[in-house]
Image: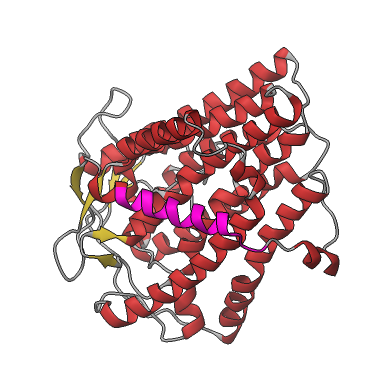
Amino acid sequence: MNTIASEPPEALGGTPTSARTTVTPANVALTFVMLLTLPLFVYYLWYCLEFNRGQLMLPSVAMLERFPLPTAGSVAIVAGWLAFQGLLQIVAPGKWIEGTPLPDGPPLKYKMNGWFAWWFTWAALAAGAALRFYSPVTLADQFGALLTTANIFTYLFCIYLYWHGKRFGTQHERITNNTVYDFWLGTALNPRLGGFDLKLFCEARPGLIAWVVLDLAFAAKQYQLHGFVSVPMLLVCTFHFWYVADYYLHEEAILTTWDIKYENFGWMLCWGDLVWVPFTYTIQAYYLVEHTHDLPWWGTVGIIALNVVGYIIFRGANIQKHRFRKNPERPVWGQRAEYIETSRGSLLLTSGWWGLSRHMNYFGDLLMGLAWCLLCGFESHLPYFYIVYFTILLVHRERRDHDMCAVRYGTDWALYCAKVRHRIVPGVY
């Protein structure tokens, strides 16, 4: 699923050698089950929030009676949103940046105009609300229908991506020729329509901005129902707004992430970008619509401090890694960067944040996620789904990265691990 985190702190490394993935019947069966059950799980979360006051409950057949069907409004919103963000990607001003060199050709170029698109989107939405072209609570009221519409679109789009990769993919694409597995992982690394990169667009635009837009729709809904916006709601919207705005401020860094460099673009990434992110990362705001509790001053200060510390670690580590990759001789914390040079020519940073753990950016991300959940209090487990899921995701990703790097770098990776002993949390894990 989509995260703004990234892989280990290396520089000057080449793309991994292309190889076919070994697919077992068990892998295929598990993949097929996830294709069916992950969307159902998101509906389960919606049902708990919408009909059970944010409390967990046992799934039942009765839930199907309230299954949210698409509406004319939800179809118009999803289609209009995708078209609007796609148009901004094409016409908005921005600089062109080269990505990672490909095995069979020069680096692809990417248009980095997310910062402009982010603020232009908010200006357009604010103008539309001020002129009464739409009501801010509409998205909150249509959340279920929007979820179904987004799911239908994403499945259809992924069928196209599967066909596009099979038809136009190049020899370096990592495919298995198993329909289910290739639909899940994708059949093309960089599917494009002309110069329009489909993977970068889906990773960086409609779902990510929609996450914050939906947050604010829930804040408007809380105001409509109760006549005020609570401090926890204000803080969760502010934290999420800042998190995504910061991403666009440093948008160029996405070109060094594992998803962009190495992952094929299939259902796993696409559905994660367009459905999972906007419809599960908004759980805290959705929950707070009906739960209007306040916070003691010390709780407010503590949660803000936790988020700020997490942000400093997350952003500091990521930008340090990005700068190191561009210029390994750049000082780290005012001193010469320390690193291990591998036999492959890659450099593994071992100073600064990256001398404290192999994934300090993950640690910062987890601290911020915990702050978001704590804003919801302790009446329900559901708002804490995010930190539980994200912990599992990042631990799994760290383990996967570790195994791949161990194969890729051999004894050099063992030396790196001996020098940077902790995986994510310094002194703990």
- Name the foreground residue: 28 vs 358: 28
The stretch in magenta equals: 69-87
Number of numbered tags placed on the structure image: 0
The reply to whether residue 348 is visible in this rendering is: yes
Q: Characterize the magenta stretch by its predominant secondary structure.
A: helix
Residue under the point 47% across and 39% down = 360
> Residue 426 appears in which quarter of the rendering?
top right
4 in the magenta segment: no
Residue 364's spot in the image, x, y percent? 52, 35
> Residue 145 appears in which quarter of the rendering?
bottom right
- Judged from this view, the residue extending furthest toward the top is 297
Residue under the point 37% across and 49% down = 84
Q: Quadrant of the C terminus?
A: top right
- Name the foreground residue: 334 vs 31: 31
Residue under the point 61% across and 31% down = 236
- Name the foreground residue: 272 vs 397: 272
The reply to whether residue 369 is visible in this rendering is: no
Residue under the point 38% across and 64% down = 263
